[in-house]
């Protein structure tokens, strides 16, 4: 468990908000807060992960600094959120990766790049800088079995760690498993996650990058998220082609894996570039400055996955293919290796918090007095 | 130090003095009517918006439901509500002007950047009459400032109007303290929308003496009433009781200024209130809290040291809105009294006498129930239950001033009236500074913003008309 100072600050701020409640129309955090009179550490971790950081409540706050109450909800919750992720991380020994996360991500990327380049250089039958074409071209660079082995191992490790992280989230936020896995709570929570309902600021958008209400951030996030799903689908279909149908990559332009991968990659690249642009222009006061490295590292790594992937797709018939393949695989490997210890986990815990919120709110709707 | 020197500043068509709701509505309306507008806000940008920054909703006439208001709220009901709270102390023509002028004002506000939300928990009793600002008054004020700037209004922060030049019933210029100097700003018309005088401690002391030293000002420290005082000194007609203010009981630990909504305490009907001598002094359960909320400021102000203490027991802790400061706690009444530095014996005797006087009944916070005391002076008429379940909790209380009633007289075109009842030619007023015309006493939730919005719009429009003919 973690988060001494951020916990105390979040408790202080939520206590002020609970006596005020002017921001209850922005998001799910305030209605959830209103179900409580005092806040345990578990409550606060849950509220922190429920916050989408839309910043509506920052610009609206009559107690924002320089007022002596110095209320800064988005920052207080973001700091606690980051601390809570360290506490949820499994195995515990790796939780430290969340400190100086930007550097960790950068180092992992570089190491992976070096490893894959060397690997490709040694294993490529005809050298790295050679045009390779036709079925199985990729595997002439990096052997098939090794590729499958490495990525399966990374994916399994990531899934295991994320699953364990989810269990610690449920424990450390006092969420009952039965309530969490109830179908109707899952449905409502998942829908809120997929729609990003709470980046809508009650229908007007979020106050990002500045005071004005805009829908840009939510739309860019949709591009990244649904682009990511398309890319995952592309990989899945490709795996099926390969193992099920015996058709090894690369695939022709009109094929399903390429279309999904291209669409997803372009969407993610555009979304990530947009998000980075907004982040560079955003007001810093409501931001968790300590989390900057983590955010930039994650966005940067995902961008690297996409850019190398797109380049590989476009230049696969040239001599650059070997180099690009190695770089792309390196980026993907670093991404998966760090999945449970990067900002990626926001997706997992946001979804979990939204499901808990769905459970709480439907209970409160059934029994308003309770 | 050199003496401040008055620079011949600039000029404009319409000068708006103030930076809250009324001033912004006036400035936007005047700019839309084609006037060149300067708006003076005496506070720094971070604290712009006066008391309007602390508001949550406004009330307006509507015939149909909207996405954020239920049902209908029509003129006669609106008027009846107003008569009820003011005890008839209102000017009917102006009051009806505000009520009618408020019809669907939500749409106008939205067109100027305001955003509303349906009430969720806690304010559901206002769901039909009052429209809630998404994010509260500060979000509203932010949106208005953005819109005003877009309409070309020149906004000056930390610019305090300190005097008005008025000749033969005509406004000529304002003297403005700004950036360490004083500057004269001439204008063809002027809208005074600078709020009440509740933040001027010296003025409050003129009325309430040293007791005012211990009052909490719930809203902006910049609402000093300087413009109001100047107008009255320059021959404007005074309206509203100069000795009255709207005051509620707030937590004694509240900041001196700007504590806003969070310092209020809703625990009184569920406990007892004693003064620093440990004695009760008023019926805590006289009526529903929203109806008695606003008398407790005055009651506490009347106690020695202008302080009082609300004591409850564990049964009551979750019956009212959570408070911003945690209650003090004691395992016994005596321990709690000691925590507050109250005379222990006296408090214990008061509680014992109260507990003995409580008659059994069916406790129900939602109705005027039959839990009351017998042969106790003062009685507690409802929700009286013995304080017998430890731990015991207590909150310190102080008077918290919301606003003052004194203002300047206006006519139906928002012109400021002179003592002789004749309007100044080009001088207008809107908002708290003239609310006394309509709210002679009492208060109705959300009506302050209604008056400011309707009169702000009238004042802006009329000022522009005066300039542009
Ligand atoms: C805690 C609290 C909650 C409230 N909630 C509500 C509510 O929900 N609904 C409602 O209708 N009413 C509410 N009210 C009442 C409401 O605040 C007022 O009726 C309303 O804000 C008055 O608006 P105004 O524009 O006249 O004054 P203000 O908003 O007070 O604005 C006055 C402005 O004038 C500026 N100023 C003062 N002197 C000078 C000077 N000499 N030169 C330049 N500028 C100057 C001030 O800085 C300020 O910006 C509440 C009040 C408080 C304290
Ligand atoms: S963020 Fe500020 S205005 Fe919003 S509920 Fe909290 S204290 Fe109130
Ligand atoms: S930043 Fe947005 S999502 Fe987070 S608490 Fe504030 S209003 Fe809610």
Image (cartoon, rainbow, N blue to C red):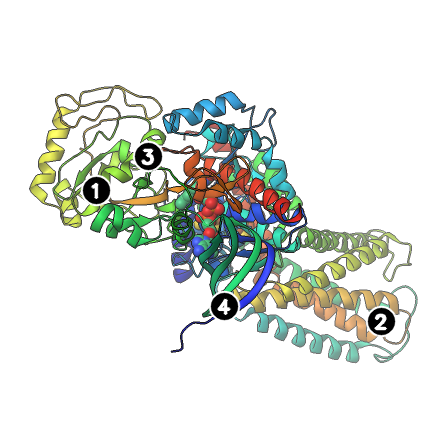
**Dot in front, 3 or 4:** 3
Measure the alpha-carbon separation of dots 3 and 4.
Answer: 52 Å
Measure the alpha-carbon separation of dots 2 and 4.
Answer: 38 Å
> Could you say whether the residue bearing mark 3 is in a helix, strand or loop?
helix
Which quarter of the image is occupied by the N terminus of chain B? Answer: bottom left
Q: Residues within 10 Å of mark 4 (few under 14, many from 20)?
A: some
Q: Residue at x 67, y 76 (%)?
A: A110
Q: Which residue is mark 3?
A: B293
Going from the N terminus, do you reach mark 1 or mark 3 first?
A: 3
> Could you say whether the residue bearing mark 2 is in a helix, strand or loop?
helix
**Dot in front, 1 or 3:** 3
Q: Tag on residue B309?
A: 1
- Give how far across and how far down residue B289 sits, in percent: 33, 31
Q: Can the viewer see residue B43? A: no
Instruction: Tell whether A87 sits left or right of A240.
Output: left
> Could you say whether the residue bearing mark 1 is in a helix, strand or loop?
strand
Number of numbered discs overlaid on the protein picture? 4
Q: Residues within 10 Å of mark 3 (few under 14, many from 20)?
A: some
Q: Which residue is mark 4?
A: A96
Q: Residues within 10 Å of mark 1 (few under 14, many from 20)?
A: many
**Vertical placement of residue B240 versus B30, above or below:** above
Q: Residue at x 34, y 53 (%)?
A: B200
Instruction: Tell whether A197 sits left or right of B18.
Output: right
């Amino acid at each position: 468990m973690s988060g001494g100072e951020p916990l105390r600050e979040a408790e202080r701020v939520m206590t002020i908000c609970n006596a005020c409640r002017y921001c209850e129309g922005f998001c799910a955090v305030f209605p959830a807060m209103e179900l409580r009179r005092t806040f345990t550490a578990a409550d606060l971790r849950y509220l922190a992960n429920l916050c989408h950081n839309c910043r509506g409540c920052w610009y609206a706050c009559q107690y924002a600094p320089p007022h002596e109450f110095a209320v800064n909800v988005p920052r207080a919750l973001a700091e606690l959120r980051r601390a809570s992720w360290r506490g949820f991380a499994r195995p515990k020994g790796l939780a430290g990766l969340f400190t100086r996360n930007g550097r960790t991500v950068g180092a992992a990327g570089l190491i992976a790049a070096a490893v894959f380049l060397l690997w490709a250089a040694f294993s490529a039958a005809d050298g790295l800088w050679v045009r390779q074409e036709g079925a199985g071209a990729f595997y002439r660079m990096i052997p098939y079995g090794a590729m499958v082995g490495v990525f399966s191992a990374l994916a399994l490790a990531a899934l295991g760690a994320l699953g364990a992280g989810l269990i610690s989230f449920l424990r450390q936020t006092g969420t009952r498993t039965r309530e969490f896995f109830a179908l109707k709570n899952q449905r409502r929570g998942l829908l809120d996650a997929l729609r990003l309902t709470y980046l809508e600021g009650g229908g007007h958008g979020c106050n990002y990058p500045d005071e004005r209400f805009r829908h840009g951030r939510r739309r860019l996030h949709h591009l990244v998220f649904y682009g990511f799903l398309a890319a995952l689908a592309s990989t899945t279909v490709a795996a099926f082609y390969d193992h099920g149908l015996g058709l090894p990559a690369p695939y022709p332009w009109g094929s399903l894996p390429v279309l999904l991968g291209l669409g997803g990659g372009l969407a993610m690249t555009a979304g990530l570039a947009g998000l980075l642009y907004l982040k560079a222009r955003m007001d810093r006061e409501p931001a968790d400055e300590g989390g900057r490295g983590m955010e930039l590292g994650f966005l940067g790594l995902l961008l690297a996955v996409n850019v190398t992937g797109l380049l590989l797709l476009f230049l696969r018939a040239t001599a650059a293919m070997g180099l690009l393949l190695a770089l792309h695989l390196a980026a993907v490997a670093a991404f998966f290796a760090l999945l449970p210890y990067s900002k990626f986990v926001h997706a997992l815990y946001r979804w979990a918090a939204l499901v808990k919120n769905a459970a709480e709110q439907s209970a409160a709707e059934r029994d308003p007095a309770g | 130090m050199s003496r401040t020197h008055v620079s011949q500043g600039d000029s404009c068509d319409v000068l708006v003095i103030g930076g809250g709701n009324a001033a912004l509505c006036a400035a936007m309306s005047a700019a839309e009517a084609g006037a060149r507008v300067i708006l003076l806000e005496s506070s720094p940008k971070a604290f712009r918006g006066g008391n309007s920054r602390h508001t949550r909703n406004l009330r307006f006439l509507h015939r149909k439901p909207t996405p954020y208001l239920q049902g209908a709220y029509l003129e006669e009901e609106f008027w009846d509500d107003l008569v009820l709270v003011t005890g008839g102390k209102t000017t009917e023509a102006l009051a009806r002007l505000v009520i009618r002028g408020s019809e669907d004002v939500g749409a106008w506000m939205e067109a100027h950047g305001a955003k509303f939300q349906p009430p969720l928990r806690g304010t559901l009793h206002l769901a039909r009459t009052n429209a809630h600002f998404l994010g509260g008054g500060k979000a509203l004020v932010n949106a208005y400032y953005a819109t005003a700037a877009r309409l070309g209004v020149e906004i000056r922060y930390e610019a305090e109007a300190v005097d008005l030049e008025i000749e033969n019933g005509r406004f000529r210029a304002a003297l403005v303290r700004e950036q360490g100097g004083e500057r004269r700003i001439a204008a063809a018309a002027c809208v005074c929308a600078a709020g009440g005088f509740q933040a001027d401690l010296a003025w409050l002391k003129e009325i309430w003496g040293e007791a005012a030293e211990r009052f909490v000002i719930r809203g902006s420290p910049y609402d000093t009433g300087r413009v109001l005082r100047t107008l009255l000194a320059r021959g404007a007609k005074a309206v509203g009781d100069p000795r009255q203010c709207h005051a509620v009981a707030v937590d004694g630990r509240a900041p001196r200024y700007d504590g806003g909504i969070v310092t209020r305490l809703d625990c009184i009907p569920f406990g007892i209130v004693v003064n620093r001598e440990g004695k009760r002094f008023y019926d805590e359960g006289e009526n529903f809290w929203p109806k008695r909320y606003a008398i407790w400021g005055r009651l506490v102000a009347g106690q020695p040291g202008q302080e009082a203490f609300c004591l409850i027991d564990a049964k009551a802790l979750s019956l009212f809105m959570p408070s911003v400061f945690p209650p003090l706690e004691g395992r016994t009444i005596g321990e709690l009294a000691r925590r507050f530095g109250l005379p222990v014996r006296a408090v214990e005797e008061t509680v014992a006498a109260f507990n003995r006087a409580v008659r059994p009944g069916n406790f129900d916070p939602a109705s005027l129930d039959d839990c009351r005391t017998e042969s106790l002076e003062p009685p507690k008429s409802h929700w009286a239950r013995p304080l017998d379940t430890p731990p015991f909790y207590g909150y310190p209380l102080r008077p918290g001033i919301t606003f003052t009633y004194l203002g300047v007289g206006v006519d139906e075109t928002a012109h400021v009236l002179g003592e002789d009842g004749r309007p100044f030619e080009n001088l207008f007023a809107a908002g708290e500074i003239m609310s006394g015309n309509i709210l002679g006493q009492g208060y109705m939730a959300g009506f302050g913003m209604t008056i400011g919005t309707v009169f702000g719009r009238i004042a802006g429009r009329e000022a522009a008309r005066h300039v542009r003919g």
